[in-house]
Amino acid sequence: MRVHILGSAAGGGFPQWNCNCVNCAGLRAGALHAKARTQCSVAVSADGSRWSLLNASPDLRAQIFSFPELLPKSRVRGSAIDAVLLSDAELDHIAGLLSLREAQPIRLYCTPRVFEWVVATNPIFAALNQSDRFNVTRLEDRKAETVGCGFGFETIFVSGKIPTYVKTPTANCDGAVVAYKLIDKSSASSLLYVPAIKEIDERFIADAAECDCLLFDGTFWSDDEMARRGTGTRTASEMGHMSISGSAGSLARLSHLRIRKIYTHINNTNPILDETSAERREIERAGWEVAEDGMDFTV
């Protein structure tokens, strides 16, 4: 299974257009040893010709041009994009769907809850719910599915937050956020994609241990990172993310896994973006990598 990181930053990208935190200011000034990043999205293929997108970021048009495998080949019009899998209904994961509205029919996978918020009650995205644009499959927890580009997947409901634009959520918001376990049908290799998660339990850790590679939520280094950097007051947990550091953080909970582990969805305030920082050295010593745009590997 080939995996191509189209974008590796959290919402707003890096540097963020309206942010002058130490990271963003440092990168613009050329004083920070870091790389610019677009908003989080991944392309995956098991046959090398048909590709599935894991989320569709607002930067998708530029990301497609950065990766020619997704561009039209022999026909006048067309695309190698076969499907889009949504992990949640956050704007930085769905806005790119609007950039795909001229394409041939694309399969869209999401939970009933995400479909309700993104399509059913939203007149802009509802316009995409047509047979010549998107064919929608509603996903259930722990149910196996198959896509046309050579792999199957299992949807795992995880803890997260309700999008802020949902003003009157129902009492049951199961399926608001999911992880995807992707399995190459020919080799049985597997990837667990988790760009957003608030907390993990032992069952999730067992799921991760069974995979060959983990692409995990690395949005924030610490729970109070926004306050530390002077960019806001909300905590990582309040924003639906598990922090990296701390006794309950992902570094402590997951670094024992003997698989390839990569942090993605990195917020512009996160010190691990600085490749010379103590935080970056700490995660690398623990066996983690940090995703960057254009990273391409095989699982």
Image (cartoon, rainbow, N blue to C red):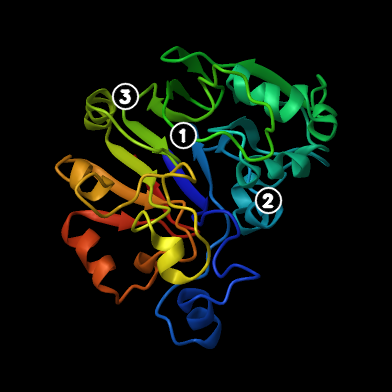
Q: Residue 232 location, x and y as percent?
A: 53, 62
**Residue 1 seen in this snapshot:** no
At label 2, the amino acid type is Pro
Query: Which residue bears the numbered disc 1?
Result: 160
Q: Residue at x 51, y 75 (%)?
A: 21
Give me the disc on residue 188: 3
How far apart are the two marked residues, 3 and 1, measured between alpha carbons?
Answer: 29 Å
Q: Is residue 148 above or below residue 101?
A: above
Q: Residue 116 location, x and y as percent?
A: 69, 21
Task: Find numbered disc 3 in the image and state the secondary structure of the residue it sits on.
Answer: loop
Residue 285 quadrant: bottom left
**Which quadrant is home to the N terminus?**
top left
Q: Residue 146 location, x and y as percent?
A: 50, 17
Toward the viewer: 281 or 78? 281
Toward the viewer: 118 or 48? 118
The mark nearer the N terminus, 2 or 3, is 2
Give me the disc on residue 69: none
Query: Which residue bears the numbered disc 2?
Result: 58
* Front disc: 2 or 3: 2
**Residue 102 seen in this snapshot:** yes
Q: Residue at x 65, y 69 (%)?
A: 17
